[in-house]
Image: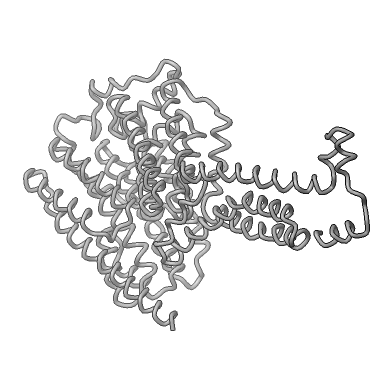
Amino acid sequence: MRRGLVLPFALVLSLALAAGLTELYDGLEAALGQVRLENPAQAVNALNRAQSLLREEGALPPVLRDAALTNLQEARQFVAQKSAVNLEARLLLVRHLVGKALYDAFLQAQGEEKAALGQRLARATGLPPALVAQARSAPPEEARRLLEARYLQAMAEDLGQALAAQSRPQAYLALARAYARYLIVQDSPQSRLKAQDFVQALALVSIGQPFRPEVQRLLGQVQAWRQDLLSSLQPSTPVPPPAQARPPEPAPSPPSGTQASPEAPSAEAETFYTPGWMDERTAQTVRLAARTLGYNYNFQLLEAVEEVRDEIGLAVTALGRGDAEEGRYRLERAFYKFRMQVEPVFVHIHPSLTEAISRSLNLLSQATGIRTLDALTAYEAVEALRQSFLQGPRQDLWLNLKLALLQTAGVPRAVFFLLAGALSVFPLYLLRLTFGGRNVYWNLLGLAFLVLLLPIFAEALSYFGSILADYGNLPALAFLSNLSIGQGLLPYLAWGFTIFLVVALAGAGLRGIAAQFGLLREREPEASRRETTPTLTSETIVEWDEEF
């Protein structure tokens, strides 16, 4: 009966989300279609409407929504600067970020819902309608490979246009198109690239450095990726033809005052000073990555790191009051900001710590049963990364150990504590079975063992509540996470109080047992011991047998 109710509910929810995505895309496309440099006031109003749509609609995942909002904000700046190439690049990224959500939903949808999503996906990302129709009738995995092969073909064409471009604005726009298409398939199992690869190539174009060797390397990676994908497709599945060389499409003329690149280097960009500990090669690479992200001063980069740290701090606050959903949302925002605004620069400063932070934030933003101590470890790591820019990278073995243990967060740690809590019952049962009964001292000792194991029971119960809240649709049980020692001051002090109880109960029980065996009487004076020592009779033996 319950299963019969769950399936229609899931179907209704899926339809509602798909309808929200299609409506969001329609409204967003109508707004972006009015963004033109010929009418700056109309363009700004259209961008404002697009931002309002993204904030009001809940159809996009938070990471995609925040990325789209950031690009729309940058588009407003380029409207003011009348930078046509940069404006078009940002609008491309916005459309493809929404296209990523359409792509994921399309692969999971059915029937009319899938048809509506396919139409929007084709318009948002430039897919041929015939290919989308073919993917509609294919199984989900086969459809994914078919569409992914087409995106890779388009990426190869874009990179070929960047190589053949006659000007840097043309190359920049072609690379931006390839980057936008990559965002849709970046989580593919066959992926051979990272976003950082495209960011690096775009930076070389922007500051007037030789970029064609880097673009050629990207093209080789894309072609190898596509070849691996095509070899895994079924022989009966038609695949798009290989990329054909074609002349580059006309690109918008460069912005006024720009001779070589969409963002010509200016004297302001030279104000990004690097610390003295950097060698010249590292400093040049850091400046290059920083300029790509729009940092003209080093304090702007440090402010971006502090924003990530502040988001983690808000996650600590949310987790401390038992709001795991809000905590994961804040960690997800921190992860997005770190990936987009911090990692492309710090990967050249402290690569091992940068990678560990990125991996940890990605895990914590999705894990169940995360605790404030987990977020505090991430907070400490981000602060250490900030210090590495000022003082140079250092290997902190203690921090590295904590980041390594952080990878156990989620289901593995929950299973560990649930198993520990269940196994703790067994020694208590054996203790009761062996020494339980009327002997008050053995009962006190058993009670001491029970209090000693209480923190393990509490930890197991806290993870049990977290699992039911996340996977059992019982959010009211999330408050049980506050029983965990890793949550805050109250459970920590409660654990300390149980230690005093254990000492008191165990001391009383063991002292009584020692007195029964006559171990404490050996310290009394000899005369007193003669007076008080009873004669061992058959009645005494019977009484001892009854006690034990």
Q: Position of residue 497 (x, y in %)?
A: 55, 43
> 449 or 225, which is in the foreground?
449
> 520 or 263, which is in the foreground?
520
Q: Quadrant of residue 372?
A: top left
Q: Residue at x 35, y 67 (%)?
A: 106
Q: Position of residue 204 (x, y in %)?
A: 35, 32
Report the residue that reaches farthest toward the bottom: 1
Q: Is residue 526 left or right of residue 441?
A: right
Q: Is residue 361 above or below residue 228?
A: above
Report the residue that reaches farthest toward the front: 531
Report the residue that reaches farthest toward the top: 276
Q: Residue at x 30, y 65 (%)?
A: 128
Q: Is residue 38 left or right of residue 62?
A: left
For the C terminus, the quadrant is: bottom right
Q: Quadrant of residue 289?
A: top left
Q: Is residue 503 above or below residue 115?
A: above
Q: Is residue 242 left or right of residue 113?
A: right
Q: Position of residue 471 (x, y in %)?
A: 46, 64
For the N terminus, the quadrant is: bottom left
Q: Residue at x 36, y 55 (%)?
A: 184
Q: How is the image coloured?
A: one colour
Q: Residue at x 84, y 42 (%)?
A: 519
